[in-house]
Image (tube, grey):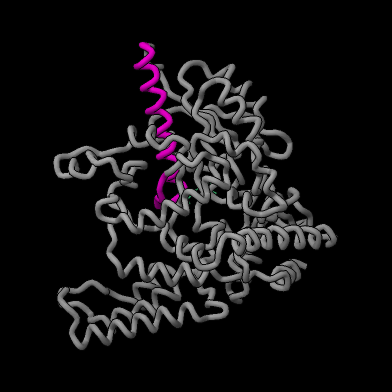
């Protein structure tokens, strides 16, 4: 709470040593969750009137709390969507923490905002948006989707006002049944309806299905949402076909690419994303498949002015910021104070160059195909779907949900891997989500062997 003393200088060294050790592991400890009772018994009451002192508090963290968290960057963490930050990005996250940069406004954060914006421009150009596109990094894809949809509805409202048309009884947007749960959450917060469009046998949304959905949707549609890489299977919707329909009807076209849009960087999957250039907005999470630490979602708009009109907060103490003709990241999403969470990715990209990113994403995809071929060869295993990006979903013949549970618990117990059960169409299965360049073919084989 004051300037450094001898004691805080020593603590600083201990903390940096802890961070250095954590970053220095070839393979970090996988670790495991603990019960509330266990944590209460081992960590006890840590908030006290006099304070524990930094060394004791660090000890509680290092010895009790940290081992009770799973390392999502462990190469055997293959559940949900893992994270695999480059060392450069993790190191720079420390610098961001040490720098107290306010990332909401150009006035306060111009240098950092400039760097973040270069990353966003690079992403926008990969997707095919014009130079005038722009946005910001928000906390996660959930907030990114919400912010884009709020901008879309605001734009639709303004258009009705300008055209002198009445407002609809209900606003609504179209997406597929395979779309992410965050869209449902956004609809609930915005109090709007979702019109679900059917998918084909591969789980993809096409323009024709959007047309059908629009025929029954009635008045009030303000956006069409396509998914570029579903979380469960990595399915990429027909971005061109869906975008064409959105454009023809004059609806905002949003692409949710939180996990999968990174696949646009890989030569072998790039063409799956044809049509992404039609987007009015898109998101992609660097903490998923762009090798950056938690938590960051890149949110980009074709026409950022429309988002600014929807999101800028006004207040007497803020007017000096918002009345300037400068790029204030806070004005483009549902947020005000913000960490410059795009800087770890910026530093890593500036360090390694974009080619290293293309190669790393491609390597994950190739590994997914290699292990899928092995699954096909094994008599007791079968693919639920052919992998598209880097997610491989498969079944073990004869296993019930309980069998998967027991097997998964054993893998974690033995600290080999974290692979949780999943299901599709009521059938239990499991999946490998591969985003970590350190995940080896040999480890995946070891996991398959454990299912014999
Ligand atoms: C993960 C994910 C989200 C949500 O992103 P968070 O960063 O977890 O909030 C949204 N859409 C898709 C397709 C995702 O995979």
Q: Is residue 324 left or right of residue 411?
A: left
Tell me, yes or no, whether the highlighted magenta stretch contains residue 154.
yes
- Expressed as whole percent of the image width and height from the top left, the position of residue 34 reads 45, 70
Is residue 249 visible from the viewing direction of this image? yes
Q: Is residue 403 visible?
A: no
> Which residues fall within the magenta stretch?
135-164
Name the quadrant of the C terminus. Answer: bottom right
Q: Position of residue 290 (x, y in %)?
A: 54, 58
Q: Decide: is 214 above or below 130.
A: above
Q: Quadrant of residue 56?
A: bottom left
Residue at 60%, 25% (x, y): give it: 245
Secondary structure, magenta segment, majority class = helix
- Identify which residue, 199 or 9, lies in the foreground: 9
Residue that appears at 34% across and 33% down: 310
Query: Residue drawn 47% across and 67% down?
Result: 89
Kindly indicate the quadrant of the structure image that contains residue 49.
bottom left
Q: Is residue 199 magenta?
A: no
- Up the image or down, 311 lies above or below 174; here it is below
The answer to whether 226 appears left or right of 157 in the picture is right
Left/right placement of residue 318 relative to residue 165 reads: left
Residue shown at 67% from the left, 48% from the top? 270
In the rendered view, tell whether residue 28 sits above or below residue 85: below
Q: Nearer the viewer, residue 376 or 206?
A: 206
Depicted 290 relative to depicted 28: above or below: above
Quadrant of the image containing the N terminus: bottom left
Q: Number of numbered discs present?
A: 0
How far from the left and from the top, in percent, is residue 324? Answer: 24, 41
Q: Position of residue 303 (x, y in %)?
A: 44, 35
């Amino acid at each position: 709470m004051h300037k450094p003393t001898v004691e805080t200088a020593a603590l600083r060294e201990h903390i940096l040593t802890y961070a250095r050790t954590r970053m220095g592991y070839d393979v970090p400890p996988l670790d495991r969750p603990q019960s509330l009772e266990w944590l209460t018994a081992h960590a006890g009451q840590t908030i006290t009137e006099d304070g524990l002192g930094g060394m004791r508090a660090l000890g509680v963290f290092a010895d009790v709390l940290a081992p009770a968290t799973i390392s999502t960057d462990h190469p055997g963490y293959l559940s949900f969507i893992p994270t695999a930050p480059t060392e450069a990005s993790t190191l720079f996250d420390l610098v961001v923490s040490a720098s107290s940069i306010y990332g909401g406004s150009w006035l306060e954060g111009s240098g950092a905002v400039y760097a973040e914006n270069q990353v966003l421009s690079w992403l926008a150009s990969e997707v095919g948006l014009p130079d005038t596109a722009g946005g910001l990094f928000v906390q996660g894809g959930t907030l990114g989707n919400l912010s884009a949809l709020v901008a879309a509805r605001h734009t639709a409202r303004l258009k009705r006002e300008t055209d002198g048309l009445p407002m609809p009884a209900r606003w609504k947007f179209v997406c597929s049944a395979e779309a992410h749960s965050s869209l449902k959450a956004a609809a609930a917060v915005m109090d709007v309806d979702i019109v679900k469009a059917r998918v084909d046998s591969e789980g993809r949304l096409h323009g024709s299905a959007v047309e059908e959905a629009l025929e029954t949707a009635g008045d009030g549609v303000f956006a069409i949402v396509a998914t570029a890489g579903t979380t469960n299977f990595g399915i990429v919707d027909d971005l061109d076909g869906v975008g064409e329909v959105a454009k023809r009807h004059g609806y905002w076209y949003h692409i949710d690419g939180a996990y999968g849009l990174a696949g646009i960087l890989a030569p072998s999957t790039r063409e799956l994303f044809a049509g992404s250039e039609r987007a009015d907005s898109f998101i992609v999470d660097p903490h998923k498949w762009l090798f950056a630490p938690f938590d960051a979602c890149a949110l980009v708009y074709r026409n950022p002015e429309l988002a600014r009109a929807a999101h800028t907060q006004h207040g007497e103490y803020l007017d000096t910021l918002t009345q300037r003709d400068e790029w204030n990241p806070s004005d483009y999403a549902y947020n005000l104070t913000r960490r410059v969470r795009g800087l770890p990715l910026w530093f890593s990209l500036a360090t390694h160059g974009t080619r290293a990113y293309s190669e790393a994403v491609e390597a994950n995809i190739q590994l997914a195909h290699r292990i899928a071929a092995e699954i096909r060869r094994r008599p007791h295993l079968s693919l639920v779907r052919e992998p598209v990006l880097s997610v491989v979903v498969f079944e073990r013949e004869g296993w019930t949900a309980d069998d998967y549970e027991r097997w998964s618990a054993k893998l974690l117990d033995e600290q080999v891997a974290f692979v949780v059960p999943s299901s599709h169409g009521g059938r239990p299965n499991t999946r490998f989500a591969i985003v970590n360049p350190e995940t080896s073919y040999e480890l995946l084989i070891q996991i398959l062997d454990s299912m014999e």
